[in-house]
Image: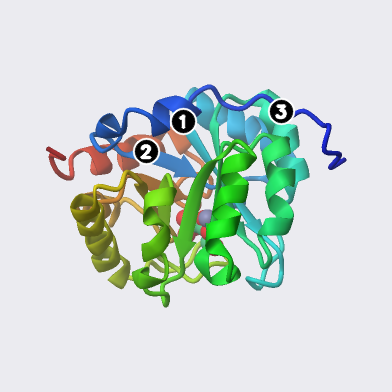
Amino acid sequence: MKKAKSEKPRKRSKSIESYFRAVGDQYERGILAPSILSADFSSLGSEVAEVEKLGIEWLHVDVMDGHFVPNLTIGPLVVQSLRPKTRLFLDCHLMVSNPSHWIDGFALAGADLITIHAEATPHLDRVISQIREAGCAVGVSVNPGTSLSMIEEVLHQVDLVLVMSVNPGFAGQKFIPSSLEKIRRLREIREHSGSRFLIEVDGGVSGDNIGRLREAGADVFVAGTAVFGVKKRADAIRRLSQSMGHAVSRK
Ligand code: DX5
Ligand code: ZN
């Protein structure tokens, strides 16, 4: 993929503003974000089309560089190929060292949201500004072993905080229960600070814990194995959505 400065960004999902403008509404319902990491890469286009037809609105794109995490997955080229084929909100999770190097490439490719890891850069404020200037919504993520204090100073600058509920690198890992408490604390911080970020949870999300995660305060639920990892996607999405919706009244 070319990275010329003059290259025009690809058309993004039209939903970007609706998700990050009427903040009050966002907390009223959960958003399911299937991760393509568990999809069949040999037919990615039809995999994505299938979940879109089933009412999914966000697609989670796991980007791994073999350095920040011990696995290697996809780059901007895949986002560029998907962009004209789908209206889904492309939620790009960058598990990479030196994220600054990749921002423009993903933005030009058509990412809607770019999430970087707090552990991956000493210049969090600068990279957040870079994502914003590139025209994307901004997310910041923390690993299970990372304290929320590491992102405290930038919470008012981001649209989303991604709480990792497994150590990043692989699909199909076991959910780490202490993530629930971290999400609760993050929601309290949001309430007390008047910040407006969404809370996303990623790793080991399933029908068994999605209700509790919703109750704890998560708004966006990444699900790899629980959606693309099963044959009956319609049933899986229905069950997850029901468990999420029945969890608690958000008022
Ligand atoms: C883990 C990734 C996750 C993962 C989720 O490093 O960031 O998005 O694919 O997969 P499951 O839902 O199988 O844990
Ligand atoms: Zn992810």
The residue that disc 3 covers is: 10
Q: As rendered, which of 108 and 227 lies closer to the eye?
A: 108
Q: As rendered, which of 189 and 115 lies closer to the eye?
A: 189
Position of the C terminus, as image quadrant, is top left
3D distance between C-alphas at marks 2 and 3: 24 Å
Q: Is residue 217 left or right of residue 49?
A: left
Residue 31 marker: 2
Position of the N terminus, as image quadrant, is top right
Color style of the picture? rainbow
Image x and y of residue 23, in percent: 31, 34
**Residue 122 is drawn in which quadrant?**
bottom right
Q: Is residue 26 visible?
A: yes
Q: As rendered, which of 124 and 185 lies closer to the eye?
A: 124
- Say whether disc 2 or disc 3 marks the residue closer to the N-terminus: 3
* Ligand 2 contact, mark 3 (Cβ < 8 Å): no
Image x and y of residue 6, in percent: 83, 32
Please name which of the two marks, 1 or 3, marks the residue nearer to the observer: 3
Q: Amino acid at mark 1?
A: Glu
3D distance between C-alphas at marks 1 and 3: 18 Å
Secondary structure of the residue carrying tag 1 is loop
The residue that disc 1 covers is: 57
The single residue placed furthest to the bottom in the displayed view is 145
Please tell me whether residue 168 is drawn above or below residue 85 in the rendered image: below
Secondary structure of the residue carrying tag 2 is strand
- Say whether disc 1 or disc 3 marks the residue closer to the N-terminus: 3
